[in-house]
């Protein structure tokens, strides 16, 4: 059965809800904005009653080989209490970083249609073995839980 555009277009939203569901399972107090016009997919109230905002980015298992954890053309300026969650379905890996960490680790396009936008390529590839792996400099952001957000 062929994948439809509707299936592809809904991937990001499905992963957002899956990740938010996992946050709830871990006991996080999560709120979901009704409108996503400020790049906020979730708001989390911490135990100290402070709040953080979270942007969730995901790549499907169907992307081109080598791009399993390539997140490109992201408009972003530094934001206090703002976090990114990057998820690669094919690699089944999740990276969590603050706004400041994302800016430090990403590259900013200097020219072209995406001038000023940021990209981060969290994976490397082995063409001989046809495998993808987390680049070593990004291993410190790999997470299997949401403890960093707590």
Image (tube, rainbow, N blue to C red):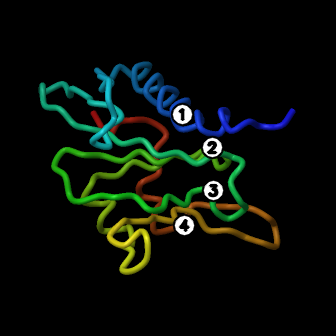
Residue 126 at x, y percent in the picture: 73, 70
Is tag 1's residue or tag 4's residue first in the polypeptide sequence? 1
- Cα distance between the residues tagged 3 and 1: 15 Å
Q: Quadrant of residue 31?
A: top left
* Residue identified by numbered label 2: 89
* Residue identified by numbered label 4: 135
Dot 1 and dot 2 residues touching (CB under 8 Å): yes
Identify the element where label 3 is drawn.
loop
* Residue identified by numbered label 1: 15
Residue 30 at x, y percent in the picture: 31, 23
Q: Quadrant of residue 77?
A: bottom left
Residue 13 at x, y percent in the picture: 51, 32
Q: Is residue 1 left or right of residue 6?
A: right
- Cα distance between the residues tagged 3 and 4: 12 Å
Identify the element where label 2 is drawn.
loop
Answer few, some or many: residues within 10 Å of disc 2's Cα (few below 14, many 20 plus, some between 14 and 19): some
Residue depicted at 32% across the width and 23% down the height? 34
Is tag 3's residue or tag 4's residue first in the polypeptide sequence? 3
Answer few, some or many: residues within 10 Å of disc 1's Cα (few below 14, many 20 plus, some between 14 and 19): some
- Looking at this view, is 96 or 61 the one in front? 61
Dot 1 and dot 4 residues touching (CB under 8 Å): no
- Cα distance between the residues tagged 2 and 3: 8 Å
Is tag 4's residue or tag 2's residue first in the polypeptide sequence? 2
* Residue identified by numbered label 3: 68
Answer few, some or many: residues within 10 Å of disc 3's Cα (few below 14, many 20 plus, some between 14 and 19): many
Q: Nearer the viewer, mark 4 or mark 2?
A: 2
């Amino acid at each position: 059965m062929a994948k439809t555009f509707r299936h592809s277009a809904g991937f990001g939203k499905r992963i957002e809800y899956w990740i938010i569901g996992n946050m709830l399972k871990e006991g996080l107090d999560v709120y979901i904005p009704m409108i996503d016009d400020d790049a906020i997919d979730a708001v989390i109230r911490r135990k100290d009653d402070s709040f953080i905002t979270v942007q969730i980015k995901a790549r499907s298992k169907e992307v081109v080989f080598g791009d399993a954890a390539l997140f490109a053309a992201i408009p972003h300026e530094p934001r206090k209490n703002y976090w990114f969650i990057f998820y690669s379905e094919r690699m089944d890996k999740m990276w969590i970083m603050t706004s400041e960490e994302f800016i430090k680790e990403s590259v900013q396009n200097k020219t072209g249609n995406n001038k000023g936008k940021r990209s981060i390529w969290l994976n490397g590839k082995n063409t001989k073995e046809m495998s993808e792996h987390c680049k070593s400099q990004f291993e410190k952001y790999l997470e299997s839980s949401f403890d960093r957000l707590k």
